[in-house]
Image (spheres, rainbow, N blue to C red):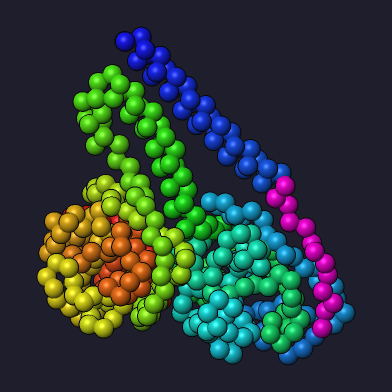
């Protein structure tokens, strides 16, 4: 009987090893293929036509008869995508031309917003409209919202401010983005790197998935030999996996703080856990109003069934950190932008449920969210128009 168990264990481990090896090889080969075949070629040339070109931010205006290259692709996106940052005003009457492609709105120069080259915005399989990206340059890093397309295929007309098509590697940033990176706007161009905020989370999920497979192998081995060891190992893993996916359902989503509203049919990850809490816990600060009728949903904060003024220093924590109300009423220390403030935990940023009236038809929160009132943002000296900021927090 013991030999039979040993053979079963060895066979199981061999199958799992082959599976992991096959998945890893497939992933490597896929990435290799992308590097080899990921070249972006010119798709044609646009015949230049001059016109009334707003030169507010040093725009490169079209010259009649000049031929401008057109691109319907951009270089592959990675965790550090090399790009050129250019300067653009998305305000009404600015050199950005008409309203933004993504939301049909104009945006103040004080908002951290960007336009991406055509390939990056929508032609590489990822729809980036209204998503956040991380921009790094000049030894700084900022988050900015994608609101427009830097058209790499069309131009030299009124809609495009009589500017030629963008190159295929452009992040066209507002003055606020340049200011946050500490750059001189008179330069006009600066080499940067950028990455998808969502992609980084997806990468973490893939890593967690690989960890899960390895854990399964260990689990079965231990169960077949000494099941009590498995329970002693489980707490040390410290990995938070998605527990499922919630089907999206659109509805009446209150948008005063520009929330990410649910879309019909989209699948949103659910989490019953959050990363471990330390003396300097990494998190993402988001903006929320806890006032009656605002985007906090409701009807009331979970901890004390009350509403809070936007002037009060209060926060909601992701489900795992909320700990089934164990942190209700506790003060946490939030650090960002060279400042630290204290805020009271009054609500849960639900990481499991959403896309209904109770949750303002917003999807479940990520598992690393500190959802804060406008007062917290003001105390940290942060721009509320950004909507997301990297922070650290700890218990008082």
Q: How many marks?
A: 0
269 is higher (above) or lower (below) than 294: above
Q: Residue at x 54, y 58 (%)?
A: 194
x and y, in percent, of residue 176 in the image? 48, 74
x and y, in percent, of residue 90 in the image? 56, 81
x and y, in percent, of residue 27 in the image? 57, 39
Q: Nearer the viewer, residue 165 or 125?
A: 125
384 is higher (above) or lower (below) than 158: above
Q: Which residues are magenta?
A: 37-49
Q: Residue at x 28, y 50 (%)?
A: 273
Q: Nearer the viewer, residue 354 or 157?
A: 354
The quadrant the C terminus occupies is bottom left
Q: Residue at x 56, y 32 (%)?
A: 22
- Residue 131 in view of the camera: yes
x and y, in percent, of residue 282 in the image? 32, 53
Magenta-drawn stretch, dominant element (helix, strand or loop): loop
């Amino acid at each position: 009987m013991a030999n039979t168990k040993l053979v079963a264990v060895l066979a199981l481990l061999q199958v799992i090893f082959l599976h992991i090896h096959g998945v890893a090889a497939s992933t490597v080969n896929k990435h290799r293929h992308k590097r080899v075949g990921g070249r972006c070629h010119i798709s044609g040339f646009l015949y230049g036509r001059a016109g009334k070109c707003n030169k507010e931010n040093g725009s490169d205006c079209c010259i009649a008869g000049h031929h401008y290259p057109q691109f319907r692709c951009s270089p592959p996106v990675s965790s550090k995508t090399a790009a050129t940052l250019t300067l653009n005003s998305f305000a009404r009457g600015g050199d950005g031309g008409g309203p933004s492609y993504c939301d049909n709105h104009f945006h103040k120069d004080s908002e951290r917003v960007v336009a991406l080259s055509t390939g990056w915005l929508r032609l590489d399989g990822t729809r980036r409209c209204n998503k956040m990206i991380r921009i790094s340059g000049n030894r700084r890093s900022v988050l900015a919202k994608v609101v427009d397309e830097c058209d790499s295929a069309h131009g030299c007309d009124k809609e495009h401010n009589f500017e030629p098509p963008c190159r295929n590697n452009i992040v066209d940033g507002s003055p606020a983005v340049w200011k946050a990176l500490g750059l001189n706007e008179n330069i006009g161009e600066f080499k940067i790197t950028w990455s998808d905020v969502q992609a980084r989370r997806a990468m973490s999920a893939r890593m967690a998935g690989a960890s899960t497979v390895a854990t399964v192998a260990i689990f079965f081995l231990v169960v077949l030999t000494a099941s009590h060891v498995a329970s002693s190992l489980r707490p040390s893993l410290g990995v938070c996996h998605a527990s499922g996916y919630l089907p999206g359902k659109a509805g009446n989503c209150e948008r005063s703080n520009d929330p990410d509203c649910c879309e019909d049919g989209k699948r949103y990850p659910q989490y019953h856990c959050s990363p471990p809490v330390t003396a300097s816990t990494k998190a993402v600060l988001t903006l929320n109003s806890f006032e009656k009728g605002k985007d906090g949903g409701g009807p009331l904060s979970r901890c004390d069934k009350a509403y809070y003024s936007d002037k009060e220093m209060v926060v909601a924590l992701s489900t795992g950190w909320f700990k089934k109300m164990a942190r209700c009423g506790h003060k946490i220390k939030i650090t960002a932008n060279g400042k630290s403030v204290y805020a009271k935990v009054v609500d849960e940023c639900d990481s499991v449920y959403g896309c209904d009236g109770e949750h303002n038809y917003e999807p479940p929160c990520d598992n690393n969210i500190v959802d804060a009132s406008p007062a917290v943002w003001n105390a940290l000296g942060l721009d509320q128009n950004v909507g997301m900021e990297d922070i650290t927090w700890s218990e008082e």
